[in-house]
Image: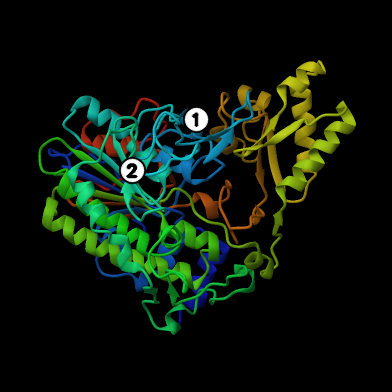
Amino acid sequence: MANSTFRRGLLVAGLAVLALVGGVAAQQLPVAASKPKLLVFLVVDGLPQRQILAYRDQLSPDGLARFLDRGAWFSDAHYAHSFTVTGAGHAIMLSGANPSRTGIIGNDWLDPLTGQPEYCAGDTSASYIGHATNALDGTSPKNLRVETLGDVLRRIDPRSKVIGISGKDRGAILPAGKSGVAYMYMGASGQFASTTHYMPAHPAWVNAFNAAKPADQYFKKQWTALLPETEYAGSLPDQQKWFGPGGGGLPATFGAAEDDAPGPRYYTGLLRGPFVDQLSLDFARAAIAGEALGQDDAPDILAVSLSGHDYVNHAFSAESRLSHDHLLQLDRMLQGFFRELDATVGAGNYLATLTADHGFMPAPEVTAALGQDSGRINPSQALGRVNQGLVARFGPGRWVINASGSTLLLDKKLMAAAKLDPDDVAEAARALLLAEPGFGVAYTRRELLANSRTGAPLFEQMRKSWHPDVSGEVQFSLKANWMFASSTSVTTHGSPHAYDTNVPILVYGPTWVKPGRVDTRVEVVDMAPTLARLLQVPAPSSSEGRQLPLLAP
């Protein structure tokens, strides 16, 4: 297509999109006389803002385009913290608080005192209903230290219902908050399940959904491209060498050739494609009917995090044809979902929003081909060299326990036994870390606690990712276009750079929001207090956000 070069420029360079359509002056939103009966809070896991705009001319009339043409959308929306990963992002969205307050500094981390692994949504006191539960599986919001919009809503009116649904446990549990109910896709069975933290047994509508075995309908089904090959000219072709041993391309069949029936390998494999997202939306439809969401004057929240895009982008990159087509598949699914919401809940009764938990960096091979400084870091080797440097200065020992979230966790007992000042060891570790290729900035516990480096590169973002009770002694970030090597991902996210922080914030609800583009820079923490205003309840108590400059109706 004629705009293929333009698309690739948007995707590969991750540029801020500022001139596709005319901007509209923003105004503060007044409180409407009515409030939504249902907030439909949609998340596309791992969706950078640049992808939506690059494919705008290929969107269906009433999917994502409903937001862009008839809703309010923000061209310059960002996360404000540095370690942009799934757990941290999902904890921010409806709390309005950064990791420095939520305590969710990543997907997982090490306990600073014991060195034992912690999972953002882990809780060994609860177990999956009807499914085996491993030690670090996500089963409750125990580790979330703040309240969410749903918690405020239910405290004011217990009739309100808050439901979180996702292909990932953390994508369901964290937006649902302390008083909602979470349901997550089970890779072992293709079912959706909650945990004993929320209830002793599933309600009838969940059992009916699972009994129909909806995931089985995709066994041996192909994911085929929606559009002719020429329509993907601006994206990277399939089967790039760096996709890994299995390659990757369309059409793709779900279910191994040697498998005669669906099983755990097949059900887990559905996560890397569009069908798990269709299942999540189908389960959301069942929840709307089963829980009668949006049917009375007590507002409800339905949070649906669609996980497939993240798996596709990790495996093939956001620049790939597979990612391009996956977003178009999602767009068509959303069109169907919105039209059903119009018919069941009522077009003037619900407010819909869409965002992402993080963006995605281009694969290092892509940026390297453009002549940009790029690379992959072996984390164990890099940390090993840092530890060797500390041994040379302070004596024998494993001074660096490991990386924890985006921090270095140092051995406090070893430092105490050697009668060393932990700040001195942290300063030395920071210097050694920054001497490693690909590391960009690092700050110590002392600096972060004292907020003493205001104005230093990325310090504010780093400070917002660091929590004194959870994080290690040195918070670090990699340079742009550098990533930690992984056997399962060709590219990733988790940085304070724009390709990871710039995500969509889209809002649709004609009763409350007038259509228009807003170019003011905003943050994802702004969503919770803004939605609280529309629901006519107080903002969550730890919220750091401001009112989004939505357009007045």
* Residue indicated by mark 1: 103
Q: Using a 10 Å C-alpha cutoff, classify the residue at mark 1 as few (fewer than 14 neighbours), some (14 to 19) or many (20 or more).
A: many
The vertical placement of 69 against 295, above or below, is below
The type of residue carrying mark 2 is Gly
**Mark number displayed over residue 133:** none
Residue 462 x %, y %: 59, 36
The quarter in which the N terminus is drawn is bottom left
Q: Is residue 20 visible?
A: no
The vertical placement of 61 against 290, above or below, is below
The vertical placement of 190 against 496, above or below, is below
Pointer 2 with pointer 1, Cβ within 8 A: no
Q: Nearer the viewer, residue 225 or 53?
A: 225
Q: CA distance from mark 2 to mark 1?
A: 30 Å
What color scheme is it?
A: rainbow
* Residue indicated by mark 2: 130
The answer to which quarter of the image holds residue 460 is top right
Residue 425 x %, y %: 78, 26
The type of residue carrying mark 1 is Gly
- With 56 as the anchor, is 370 left or right in this view? right
* Sequence-wise first label, 2 or 1: 1
Q: Using a 10 Å C-alpha cutoff, classify the residue at mark 2 as few (fewer than 14 neighbours), some (14 to 19) or many (20 or more).
A: few
Residue at x-position 88% and y-position 27%:
395
Q: Nearer the viewer, residue 247 or 235?
A: 247
Q: Is residue 326 visible?
A: yes
Residue 533 x %, y %: 25, 35
Question: Which is closer to the viewer, label 2 or label 1?
Answer: 2
- With 21 as the anchor, is 531 left or right in this view? left
Q: Nearer the viewer, residue 26 or 87?
A: 87
Secondary structure type for disc 2? loop
Total marks placed? 2
Residue 353 x %, y %: 30, 49
Secondary structure type for disc 1? loop
